[in-house]
Amino acid sequence: MRFGVRARLFVVSVLLVACGVLAFGIALERQLRRRLAASEEEDVRRAALAARALVLARAAAGRGLGDADAVADELGAVTGLRITIVGADGSVLGDSALAPAEIARVDNHAGRPEIVAARRTGEGRARRYSTTVRAELVYVALPVDDDSGWIVRAAKPLREVDEAVAELRRNLAATGLAGLVVAALLSALASHWLGRPLRTLAASAQAIARGTPAPRMRADRPDELGLLAGSLNRVADQIRVAIDQLAGERARFSAVLEAMTDGVVAIDADRRITLVNGAAANLLDADDRAIGRPLVDVLRAPAIARLLDARDGDVELEVGDGRKIRARASRLPDDSGWVLVLSDITDLHRLATVRRDFVANVSHELRTPVSVVQATAETLLDGALDDPAHARPMVEALHRNAVRMAALIADLLDLARIEAGRYALDSARVAVSAIAERAIAAARPAAAARGSTIAVDVAAGLAVRGDAGALEHVLANLLDNAIKYAGDGARIAVSARAAGDRVTICVTDDGPGIPAAHRERVFERFYRVDPGRSRAQGGTGLGLAIVKHLVEAMSGTVRVDTAHPSGAAFRIDLPAA
């Protein structure tokens, strides 16, 4: 619970008055008790002196003490106090407050403080609670004479003192309560009077804090509140000027950000987005709702987290629509966050890829068939065309190399389309058995020409999530690869099994297999285990690269299965449908 200044002033004032009344009451009570007790003690002393004088007068008259208890009762009646006669051995001989039968059960009084003091100094005084009469009493003891050793003791309960103190307490309580009421009213009025300018100052300060126009405060008071009001007025003026400047700078900054072709994303120390310009919103397919969200929710790329951890640097990413972006991160000097600049390099990346592939692939792969075509054509033009025995083999060589170049160009075009993201893939439920049967049917003539067989073992109803045409292309390339390189009379098999939320498809053969040193690189473009044999078989060196790109485009993986005991085995894992 929060207390305002008025409440605090009120509480403090009431507490001060209450503490003052309480302290005064305690001091007054102690003083009154001390004075009244001292007065009672003197009364008891006078009564003790009178009792001793009566005992001595009785002895002088020859009457003696006789029955000490009767004498004590007589003295008690005369003095109006409790009179006790104690013998020389400390035993109680008589007590005006006790019946004769009770006196025998009273403890020996030789050790009582007032008795001891009376024997030592001639007078003893004490105050204590008496268990006999169940009250606090004041005691005064005097020796009767020097010979008998008797002590006469007078005692009086302090009930009158207690009653006077209790009456004082009641009066003080009533007076204090009235004083508290008056003090509460006065402190409430005073706190309200003092709190009014404070409330005005607080309202103005809150308006300044919110950035809203604040009314001018009166600064003509000759006290500290006037000084505070003047200071707040000056602060408000300075803040108003600063806000106007910041608003202008913010407008210019926003205009520059929105005019930039590169995306800009500001991130705080907790990696939450604090600013996104229009270009970044387009690249990330985000809007103003991205503000305040974690960056990982908007740009799901582990490389970004590593980039931020590295403080500065850049990394290339691919966003959801296939665009390539280069992200550059710079950490703020005070380590309060980062500034992430996003550049769309999709076109540059595509052009570089196309140029690199065209130069490398065409120059490397077309060199041999083009040379063969050129040499054969030149030979034919030199006269071999007129020699039927030599012309036909040369024309056949021209045809083979033309077919090889056509296949190479077709594979190059497919691979270029896939890598450039222009190979449109569906994401649908695809029955594995139907696709496998189509691919096998297309491959059987080539297999039969080499005496090879193709077996299929696909569980019924097995389906994957992917593109039917792409999956058929993958299986066709793998079957073509097996027919060409497994050798004549090879046994080729296509199998598929479910494995949790994935489906595993295997294409195996019993040919010579793939040496371990080449298994990691067979999916590279134009990589061949045996280049001479591959070209002789009409291979382009792109079939497995196309397989890898298509499988990955369907969120799958492909690898050489090293667990296969003999021959070559390719294992494809795709999401189950």
Image (spheres, grey):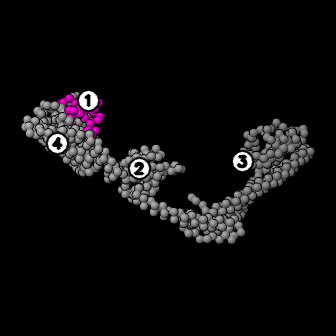
- Name the amino acid type tagged 2: Ala
Closer-to-camera residue (28/79):
28
Mark 3 vs mark 4: give the one in front: 4
| Type of amino acid under label 4 | Ala
Task: Please provide percent x and percent y for residue 430.
Answer: 20, 47
Place of residue 485 in the rendered image (x, y in percent of width and height, measured from the top left): 19, 33
Q: Is residue 573 visible?
A: no
Closer to us: mark 3 or mark 2? 2
Say left or right for 249 vs 189. left
Tell me the quarter of the picture where residue 569 sits.
top left
Query: Which mark, residue 527?
Result: none
Q: Residue beneath label 1, please?
A: 515
Report the residue marked by disc 3: 134
Q: Residue furthest right?
A: 60
Is label 4 or label 1 in front? 4
> Which span is picked out in magenta?
505-534
Q: Is residue 18 left or right of residue 82?
A: left
Please give the name of the residue rendered at 73% of the width and 43% of the height, measured from the top-left corner.
102
Q: Residues within 10 Å of mark 2 (few under 14, many from 20)?
A: many
Q: Total number of numbered labels?
A: 4
Mark 1 or mark 2, earlier in chain: 2
- Disc nearer the start of the sequence (4/1): 4
Q: Quadrant of residue 188?
A: bottom right
Q: Secondary structure at mark 4?
A: helix
Residue labelled with disc 2: 327
Q: Residue at (79%, 48%) from the top-left corner?
A: 138
- The amino acid on which the numbered mark 3 sits, given as a three-letter code, is Arg
Ranked by sequence position, the earlier of labels 4 and 2 is: 2
